[in-house]
Amino acid sequence: EPDDTPAPGTPDAEFENSLRPRRLSEVVGQRKVVERLGITLDAARRRGEPLGHLLLDGPPGLGKTTLATVVPRELDPDGGPGNIQFTSGPALRAPHDLVAYLTCATRGSVLFIDEIHRLPPAVEEYLYPAMEDFRVDIVMGEGTGARTVSLNIEPFTVIGATTRSGMLTAPLRDRFVNHERVEYYEVSDLAEIVRRNAAKLGLTVEGDAAEQLARRSRGTPRKANNLLRWCRDFTQVHSERGVLTPTLAARALEMREVDALGLEDQDRRYLRTIIEAFAGGPVGLSTLSHALSVPTDTLEDEVEPYLLRCGLMQRTSRGRVATVRAWEHLGLDRAADGGS
Ligand code: ADP
């Protein structure tokens, strides 16, 4: 499992859902995205219309699903959860797989399509009239007697999530009137998420323990939640008072092998490989992927964005290059390696 997105229905997914913000006002950080979405939602509410189709773009674990689940709740006049259906690009293999979702869509409901850049072309084309005119074409009968019936469906909202908006075809991208990009979080926002979620889990956090977790979360709320979960177990075993103190947090984090920048084993292995096997680069993505036995997608979507943000590597026209900072971070001597 490259990305740590939990599979639906598992205890991990339940843990994640239990910590998900329910209203827009509970969403921490991403201020501009939240402000813009607030206005679009307010306008839709006043007009009594569904929200325009929304594309959410950004690395895994930054809140795309969370924002999608907030939308129908915000539009539900009774303050209920609203109606949202979940599917994903790879799960929709043929237009046929999409029909039930479309015909089940109620007025103002949301159809969340994760990894929308992986929709097969035939499914994508089938989605166009549904998004544009709220219409689906259904083939009745077989062979020469077959005819196509056009069916009206309820006005609804597609929320597409992608780690790669660049891979979307132009016609699909154009059908989204709203496009938001979620970014890595500031430490202060992550600390706030840790504190709120610790309270939800009934764990007392003292001193700067929440900041410590936040600093090692790789800018990602999902990582922060996972570290919090680990710290809760650690506290249960090691603290009689059941309190996560800064000292206890430091011990728990040390055991988890997340370093000061939040890098995990896979991130360090990536940098080490560029430095030790390819003299610091440049090295091509596919070469690196082979050397690490990690798919190129995973490297591009999950590993590199954060390393780039930390200034530990660069993408050049000739390939990936480790920066001086990478040597320093790993405690390696650049001169000894003959790096230039
Ligand atoms: P994505 O869909 O981008 O992979 P998710 O929406 O599933 O990410 O987020 C993972 C978890 O991180 C959620 O369960 C939620 O607890 C937490 N989370 C994400 N974004 C936020 C946020 N802005 N505020 C509070 N918690 C968040």
Image (cartoon, grey):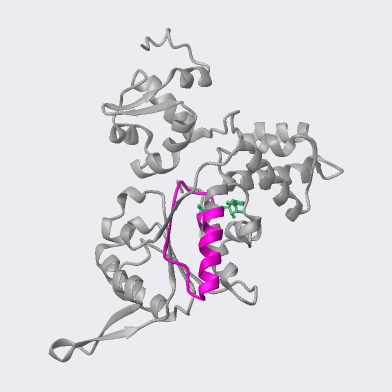
Position of 29 relative to 255 (above/below): below
Position of 204 relative to 153 (above/below): above
Residue occupying the point 60% across, 32% down: 257
Q: Position of residue 93 (x, y in %)?
A: 31, 67
In the drawing, does residue 135 fall left or right of residue 25? left
- Nearer-the-camera pick, 264 or 191: 191
Q: Name, please, the residue furthest toward the left.
A: 144
Q: Position of residue 87 (x, y in %)?
A: 43, 66
Q: Is residue 56 magenta?
A: yes
Q: Name, please, the residue furthest toward the right.
A: 241
In the drawing, does residue 265 fall left or right of residue 133? right
Residue occupying the point 16% across, 92% down: 145
Q: Name, please, the residue furthest toward the bottom.
A: 145
Residue occupying the point 44% across, 42% down: 302
Q: Position of residue 296 (x, y in %)?
A: 34, 41
Residue 8 seen from this side: no
Please report the bounds of the magenta region as a residue range.
35-64
Number of numbered discs visible in the structure rendering: 0
- Nearer-the-camera pick, 218 or 51: 51
Residue 83 seen from this side: yes
Residue 216 found in image quarter: top right
Q: Position of residue 170 (x, y in %)?
A: 27, 56
